[in-house]
Image (cartoon, helix red, strand yellow):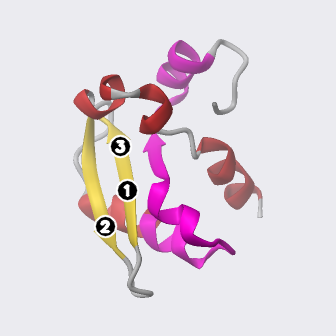
Amino acid sequence: MRRALLLLLLVVLAASLGPRAASAANGGTYGTTSGEQVQVLSSDAYPVDDARNQTWAEFLSRLVHGDELATVTLYLAPPAELSRICGRDALAC
């Protein structure tokens, strides 16, 4: 449950960060077993890992949601980068 809450807080996304996040990230749009498309980007501070990004896409697709999932971009970032982007005390933005 705690991981799910943290994830929901981290649904920060490149839409709000613009090209800055996309240029410093790896990932893309992942198809899920439910047939949905989910955008997942990981900071370039992490090794490229499409399996990890796919896992997050699947996780998001299993949460209660509507059509908005197609408009969400999950940007995964380490704490230092999150603080730099969102502010020192932020858990997400």
Q: Position of residue 70 (x, y in %)?
A: 45, 63
- Residue 76 counted in the magenta span: yes
At x 60%, y 19%, the residue is 86
Which residue was labeled with disc 1? Answer: 39
Marks 3, 1: nearer the viewer: 1
Rounded to the nearest angstrom, the CA distance separating label 2 from label 1 is 6 Å
Q: Earlier in the sequence, mark 2 or mark 1?
A: 2
Rounded to the nearest angstrom, the CA distance separating label 3 from label 1 is 10 Å
The answer to whether the residues at label 2 and label 1 have Cβ atoms under 8 Å apart is yes
Counting other residues with Cα less than 10 Å from the Cα at mark 1, is it few (<14), some (14-19), or many (20 or more)?
A: many
The answer to whether the residues at label 2 and label 3 have Cβ atoms under 8 Å apart is no
Residue segment shown in magenta: 57-86
For badge 3, the amino acid type reads Ser
**Up/down of 59 relative to 13, above or below:** below
At x 35%, y 46%, the residue is 41
The answer to whether the residues at label 3 and label 1 have Cβ atoms under 8 Å apart is no
- Residue 68 counted in the magenta span: yes
Q: Secondary structure at mark 3?
A: strand
For badge 2, the amino acid type reads Tyr
